[in-house]
């Protein structure tokens, strides 16, 4: 009888061990500890993570991250869906989760051409707003959102993706309406966004954030021009976010180093704000949200050993560059927690669909050992 009970209990334990994924890879080092003397490590969190509906993802975040960004819930469309209606609960949950786990909280994002409702740019008769009306709408939004989390959100992506690949300003409705087609007004919406964010929380850090800064020198130069412009007007800007949506083929070491060093030379901090590496060899490989769809991100070969090895190599290359330039880099944030919930599909993160650390995870940890080895003159091995 006793033996049968023991056997039943043992089978249950074996069954559970096989079905409940080992939470957050309990025996692996925490990334935030590995890089504690170098930069913050974080992730974009979705609603399921912060409300506990995805407890294994929450466990990964708690263990490995000391900073977090809301993946969607602070975007205009989510937080301010109608002119007279704000929707705070999801963003409040995000901020509370970060505070509970002592993570540096990042707000993303205040002014962007995507995930912003149509009404923002229209008057009651559905005509385009005037410059002054749009400026005042933007000011109200920024004051309200930044003001609500004053002292709790440490840094804001104030303006997101304002640049074209050639470094000119993207022709968004923000630019069209507020810039009025005039050369001397083209930076006006950016200037005002930063000014009002600073007014709403004078202690918050303010960032410009964009993709492809590490692949297009012209675009990176455009970001440098934005920083220099704001500085020349005495407007606060603390950092530039290189989103770093990479692929197995990019960025190159040279491209990433160019971006880090030229941005840092303006005197701002540099951060990797949305790191992931697309494993798909086919289909769209950029980071323009309007082009990403299930059809072009589905990737049956993502789990293949060869793909995972290439992914590990690319991550190792990127982290070696980041460690080399650590004096300029304050934060590295992954765009998601584990593969199943990544916005681009495939296998782009450090944890797989069963929440397990991948080869790429260990490759990233190893870059730190090799880096210390280089610094103290050994080869990094014990
Ligand atoms: C993505 C989110 O991850 C998706 O869930 C959403 O459907 C679209 O936006 N650049 C950004 C992020 O600045 O806000 C985008 O996030 C990815 C590209």
Image: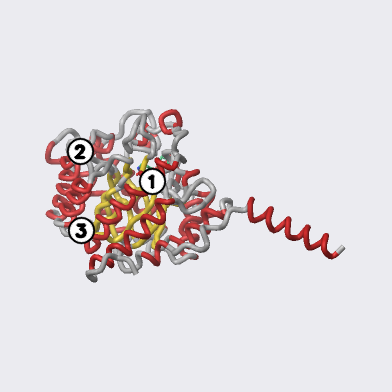
Please state which of the two labelled residues, at mark 1 or mark 3, is closer to the viewer.
Answer: 1
Of the image marks 3 and 2, the number of the one nearer the N terminus: 2
Ligand 1 sits in which quadrant?
top left
Mark 1 element type: helix
Read off the residue under disc 2: 169
3D distance between C-alphas at marks 3 and 2: 20 Å
The residue under label 3 is 268
Mark 2 or mark 1, which is nearer the start of the sequence?
2
Q: Quadrant of the C terminus?
A: bottom left
The disc at residue 309 is 1
**Which of the 4 quarters of the picture holds residue 271?**
bottom left
> Could you tell me how far apart the alpha carbons at marks 1 and 2 are, in whole angstroms?
38 Å
Q: Is residue 153 left or right of residue 264?
A: right
Q: Is residue 223 above or below residue 155?
A: above
For mark 1, does the 10 Å Cα neighbourhood hold few (<14), some (14 to 19), or many (20 or more) residues? Answer: some
Classify 335 as above or below 130: below
Q: Position of residue 358 (x, y in %)?
A: 45, 51
First in sequence: mark 1 or mark 3?
Answer: 3
**92 left or right of 322 in image:** right
Quadrant (top left, top right, bottom left, bottom right) of the N terminus: bottom right
- Figure colour scheme: secondary structure
Front position in the image: 18 or 129: 18
Q: Nearer the viewer, mark 3 or mark 2?
A: 3
Residue 61 seen by the camera: yes
For the residue pair 253 and 97, the one nearer the viewer reads as 253
Asked if disc 1 and disc 3 are in contact, CB closer than 8 Å, the reply is no
Which secondary structure lies at badge 3?
Answer: loop
Residue 173 percent location from the top left of the image? 28, 34
Residue at the spot x=48%, y=55% of the render?
A: 94
* Marks 1 & 2, CB-CB < 8 Å contact: no
């Amino acid at each position: 009888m006793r033996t049968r009970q023991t056997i039943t209990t043992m089978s249950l334990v074996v069954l559970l061990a096989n079905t409940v994924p080992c939470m957050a890879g309990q025996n692996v080092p925490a990334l935030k500890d590995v890089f504690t003397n170098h930069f913050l490590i974080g992730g974009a969190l979705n609603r399921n993570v912060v409300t506990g509906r995805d407890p294994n993802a929450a466990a990964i975040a708690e263990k490995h991250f000391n900073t977090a960004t809301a993946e969607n819930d602070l975007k205009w469309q989510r937080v301010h869906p109608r002119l007279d209606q704000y929707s705070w609960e999801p963003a409040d949950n995000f901020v509370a989760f970060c505070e509970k786990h002592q993570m540096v909280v990042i707000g993303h994002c205040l002014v962007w051409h995507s995930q912003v409702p149509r009404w923002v740019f229209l008057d009651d008769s559905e005509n385009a707003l005037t410059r002054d009306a749009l400026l005042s709408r933007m000011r109200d939004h920024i004051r309200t959102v930044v003001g609500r989390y004053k002292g709790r959100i440490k840094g804001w992506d104030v303006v997101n993706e304002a640049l074209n690949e050639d470094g000119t300003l993207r022709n968004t409705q923000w630019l069209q309406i507020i810039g009025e087609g005039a050369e001397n007004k083209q930076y006006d919406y950016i200037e005002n966004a930063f000014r009002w964010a600073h007014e709403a929380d004078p202690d918050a850090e303010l960032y410009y954030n964009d993709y492809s800064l590490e692949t297009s020198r012209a675009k990176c130069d455009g970001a440098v021009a934005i920083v220099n412009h704001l500085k020349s007007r005495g407007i606060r800007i603390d950092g530039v976010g290189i989103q770093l949506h990479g692929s197995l083929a990019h960025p190159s070491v040279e491209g990433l180093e160019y971006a880090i060093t030229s941005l840092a030379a303006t005197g701002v901090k540099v951060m990797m704000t949305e790191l992931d590496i697309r494993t798909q060899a086919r289909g769209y490989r950029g980071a323009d949200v309007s082009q990403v769809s299930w059809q072009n991100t589905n990737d049956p070969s993502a789990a293949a050993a060869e793909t995972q090895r290439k992914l590990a190599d690319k991550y190792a290359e990127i982290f070696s560059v980041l460690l080399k330039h650590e004096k300029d880099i304050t934060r590295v944030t992954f765009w998601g927690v584990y593969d199943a919930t990544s916005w681009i599909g495939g296998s782009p993160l450090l944890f797989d669909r069963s929440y397990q650390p991948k080869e790429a995870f260990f490759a990233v940890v190893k870059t730190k050992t090799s880096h210390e080895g280089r610094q103290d003159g050994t080869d990094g091995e014990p």
